[in-house]
Amino acid sequence: MAIPAAFLIAALAGCASKPVMQDGIRVNDPYEAQNRQIHNFNKAVDARLIGPVSRLASTGGDDAASDKGQPGPLDLVINMGSNLSLPGKVVNSLLQGRPGPATRNFFRFAVNSTLGIGGMFDPAGSDFGLPEEDTDFGETLAVWGVAEGAYVELPVLGPSTQRDAVGKVVDLAIDPMWSILQTDRQRALAFGLRAGAKAGDRARFGDTVDSVLRDSADSYAQTRLIYLMHRRHDLGEESSDIDPYADPYADAAAIDPYEQ
């Protein structure tokens, strides 16, 4: 499945329009009209469902638990959801030719699934020095040399690119957890825990997310800019933002040498 996905994203990328620059960031967004409609839908879902649920979860006793040095209910959900994502990260690291992160994530999963009581606690990180090393199939495609493609905003899932959108689908297909979990109830529980972990992330960064979605003059453009900046930084692709046709002296020429 991985190879057809790679060809698909490459073909989609080839259909993209000429990128433009936004605050020094290269933006390839030929589907902006459709993306903005989905963005407005996502904002409505966040305002009516995701935001309130995440705020409710964040007030579920976590502050009191943290004062005692213990994880609160939200922390436990986040820990379990993150733990269930580790087998997929192991597979992706191997596909990227990175056995080191694959090995560390494997042992992190083993330790937290046993000593951490199904991943509720994180002895791998606190006692064994094994932090989670995040990756996904979108990064795998990047390592294989597949182009980023156009920017897209996905319903509910939010900002992405064509490459990462394909990656999200393939991640579900190659995740060993779906083979390990035998019943629909187990799979539904695992999916719910992962969704809960995402809601936990929304709660932790709630002020920042609210500021972007509610206070920005153009929340769509701001969301797109932040996503592309962070994603390219994570993948080491910041150099793709450099405009080869830009005048390096343009800013300097605008400076008045006599202005004090």
Image: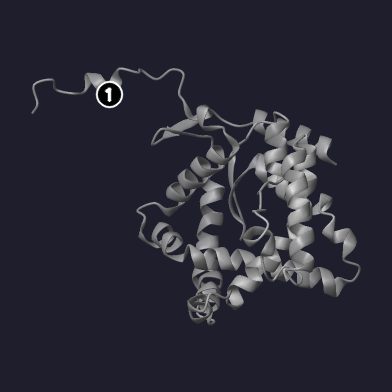
Name the kind of residue labelled 1 in the image: Asp
Residue at figure coordinates x 60%, y 37% from the top left: 235
Q: Is residue 136 left or right of residue 180?
A: left
Q: In the rendered image of this protein, does residue 191 appear above or below residue 243?
A: below
* Nearest the eye: 29 or 223: 223
Q: Can residue 30 be spotted in the picture?
A: no
For label 1, the SS is helix
Q: Which of 11 and 193 is in front in this view?
A: 193
At label 1, counting other C-alpha atoms closer than 10 Å, the crowd grade (few under 14, some 14-19, many 20 or more) is few
Residue 94, position as x, y percentages in the image: 79, 40
Q: Position of residue 152 (x, y in %)?
A: 59, 45
Which residue is depicted at the point 76% across and 61% down? 111
**Going by the image, does 42 lie left or right of 225?**
right
- Residue at 23 percent of width and 18 percent of height: 253
Quadrant in the picture for the C terminus: top left
Q: Position of residue 213 (x, y in %)?
A: 43, 59
Examine the image and state in which quarter residue 96 appears. top right
The answer to whether one can see residue 145 in this image is yes
What's the colour scheme? one colour
In the rendered image, which quarter contains the N terminus? Answer: top right
Q: Is residue 223 above or below residue 189?
A: above
Q: For residue 157, what is the image quadrant?
A: bottom right
Q: Which residue is pictured at 46% across the width and 44% down the height?
A: 225
Compared to 222, does 46 lie above or below?
below
The answer to which quarter of the image holds residue 243 is top left
- Residue placed under numbered mark 1 in the picture: 251
Q: Where is residue 140 in the image (x, y as percent from the top left)?
A: 72, 38
Q: Residue furthest front?
A: 127
Left or right: where 195 falls relative to 33: right
Total numbered circles: 1
